[in-house]
Image (tube, helix red, strand yellow):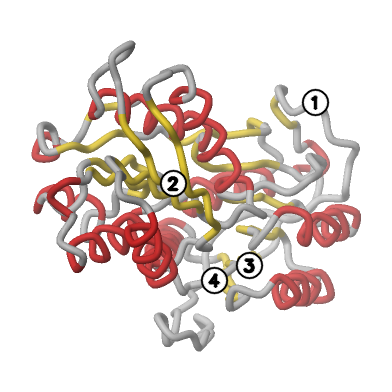
Amino acid sequence: MPRLLTVTTPLLACLVISSFVAAASEPATQPPPATQSVPRDAAAARPAKDRYVIGFSQCTVKEPWRVEFNKRLIEHAKSNYPNVQLDVLDADDKTEKQVADVRSFIRRGVDAILISPKESAGLTNVVKEATEAGIPVVVLDRDVNWDGYAAFVGGDNKLIGRAAGRVAIDLLGGPGRAKGVIYEICGGLASTPGQERRDGFHEVVTQEPGIRIIGGLDCDWKKDKAYSVMQDALKATPQIDLVYAHNDPMAHGAYLAAKKAGRAEDLKFIGIDALPEEGVRWVRSGELTATLLYPTPGAAGLDIAMKILRGERVDKRTTLPTRVFTRANVNQGGEEVK
């Protein structure tokens, strides 16, 4: 029988968890270098089972991108793996709860674990614990400070940051001529995406002597926090030409603050995520100037977990592609970033 798991959150009342097909789990092995593919011969040697259980630890569903992440993962699992049970736990934006959730999967002896960490340092040890218990762990979206897990799947946040930087330069006059003040609104800087989206952007933009970057406060990916921070920035700073926010909700929160202050028409806004009903729609309506796609990694992560359990070889790291959406290309599906 399918299993029903209810996860109570402000944005997601329940998640229906079905059963999907895979093979057995494996004993822990010494991981190869991150650039090599990972053999899973030990898993192949185990006898097949009628049903497999995969635990998925999501850090939060308080952000629309993560709600979409869960939705796509669950739909993919239901459609493609009808004899494997996926159990989803929501850590409610708390590292300590996520650690406890993963330990509950370890105690139960699930066949594999998918995890999207709240932050890097706090989840590193429990990922090690699961791996040492012989459970393959696939890390999604945000990395941890140890690469001995089975596989990682996510976007290239530094690449996305660099691409956002090139968009900003073009909007402010072009390479070698760009001038202006950029106000940066950061996501969770304890997480690798926040760090890498900042670092990639700065790597490109700081090459332009006419551009100055200010701000940089951590708004933890939240729209309301970005709105409040932008209100303060507009009062304190006479000149802001462009806002770069590490996700679309924060960029839109900044836009709404600027609109209330009567300054939205004078600013440009760049975000990241490009969900169809958020970032892409806001670009189409003119509220955001540009957004960059950050694809949800759940479906690809589940596929990789299934391959590992079947004893197949997988890449240690799988990088998902991105696209940039502007008013000029949004109706054509954006432009691929290379």
Disc 4 marks a residue whose amino acid type is Thr
Residue 188: where, in percent of width, then height? 57, 57
Q: Dot 3, how many residues are within 10 Å of its Cα: few (below 14), some (14-19), or many (20+)?
A: many
Q: Residue at x 25, y 53 (%)?
A: 279
Near-viewer residue (44 or 242): 242
Residue 302: where, in percent of width, then height? 55, 52
- How far apart are the two marked residues, 3 and 4, measured between alpha carbons? 9 Å
Q: Residue at x 52, y 85 (%)?
A: 7
Identify the residue under disc 2: 184
Single out the mark in the foreground, 4 or 1.
Answer: 4
Q: Quadrant of residue 55?
A: bottom right
Identify the residue under disc 3: 57
- How far apart are the two marked residues, 1 and 2, measured between alpha carbons? 35 Å
Q: Mark 3 or mark 2: which comes first in sequence?
A: 3
Disc 3 marks a residue whose amino acid type is Ser
Disc 2 marks a residue whose amino acid type is Glu
Residue 283 falls left or right of residue 105: left
Against 182, is 190 above or below?
below
Single out the mark in the foreground, 1 or 2.
Answer: 2
- How far apart are the two marked residues, 3 and 1, measured between alpha carbons? 25 Å
Identify the residue under disc 4: 60
Residue 184 visible, this orientation: yes
- How far apart are the two marked residues, 3 and 2, measured between alpha carbons? 30 Å
